[in-house]
Amino acid sequence: DAEITQSPRHKITETGRQVTLACHQTWNHNNMFWYRQDLGHGLRLIHYSYGVQDTNKGEVSDGYSVSRSNTEDLPLTLESAASSQTSVYFCASSERGRAGTQYFGPGTRLTVL
Amino acid sequence: RKEVEQDPGPFNVPEGATVAFNCTYSNSASQSFFWYRQDCRKEPKLLMSVYSSGNEDGRFTAQLNRASQYISLLIRDSKLSDSATYLCVVSTGTASKLTFGTGTRLQVTL
């Protein structure tokens, strides 16, 4: 069965370290997204991609970067982790033209100390 | 003002009750509308799309009022398994991007 996975599921790191969160989907979807979810803010879009070599900034992209070298993966990198980036991170994917049907990964809980 | 606003709840209802959630959106150019469900500490999952004519999926009915920029979700005959947070979601402009409300929490009790 097709799926979308994230790793690690939990991560504790220190301020200033570089952290990469992995996202892998086997749906063969063109579109991939990264969100963060915090109390009081709901899901906020960090970065998104419509295909290989395509990346775009979302509403809260500062301090994050992504790259898309193949269809299946969209890793999210925190260049220099800050305590404000403590959050739950969700990756999602969707078919081209099927905006509303996004499939989410199980999430990564990141704590920056 | 948030782009998508929801009452956070919680809504505490007994099994078998009917409950309704509302959501308002600020961008009149919004084109597509959805309800997602999120269980505690889990990922969001699409519950249903919302169409102008209104649509039903079993015990769930969704309505859209474009003039008032208002979306609703009605759940009839609530089950314990309906306990979750319901996210109102809007797509504006670039079709593949979604804007999520903060969610309304529902707790169904015996």
Image (tube, rainbow, N blue to C red):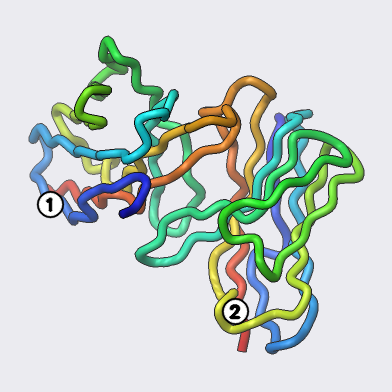
Residue bearing the label numbered 2: A111
Q: Residue at x 39, y 56 (%)?
A: B40
| On screen, residue B108 above or below A42 | above
User: Which amino acid lies under the numbered mark 2 shown in the image of this protein?
Assistant: Thr
Q: Residues within 10 Å of mark 1 (few under 14, many from 20)?
A: few
Q: Residue at x 43, y 45 (%)?
A: B100
| On screen, residue B106 above or below B56 | below
For mark 2, name the chain: A
Q: Nearer the viewer, residue A62 or B12?
A: A62
Return the residue found at the far right: A69
In-image side of B7 versus B31 (left or right): left
Q: Residue at x 63, y 43 (%)?
A: A92
Q: Secondary structure at mark 1?
A: strand
Residue bearing the label numbered 1: B12
Q: Quadrant of residue A98?
A: top right
2 or 1: mark nearer the eye = 2
For mark 1, name the chain: B
In-image side of A50 versus B93 (left or right): right
Q: Nearer the viewer, residue A90 or B28?
A: B28
In-image side of A63 versus B97 (left or right): right
Q: Nearer the viewer, residue B95 or B109?
A: B95
User: Which amino acid lies under the numbered mark 1 shown in the image of this protein?
Assistant: Asn
Q: Quadrant of residue B77?
A: top left
| Image mark count | 2
The lab-note entry on whether marks 2 and 1 share a chain reads no
Q: Residues within 10 Å of mark 2 (few under 14, many from 20)?
A: some
Q: Are the residues tagged 2 and 1 within 8 Å (C-beta)?
A: no
Of the 4 image quadrants, the one containing the N terminus of chain B is bottom left
Question: Whole-percent x and y of residue B65?
Answer: 23, 23
Q: Secondary structure at mark 2?
A: strand
Question: Whole-percent x and y of residue B32?
Answer: 43, 25
Q: Residue at x 59, y 36 (%)?
A: A103
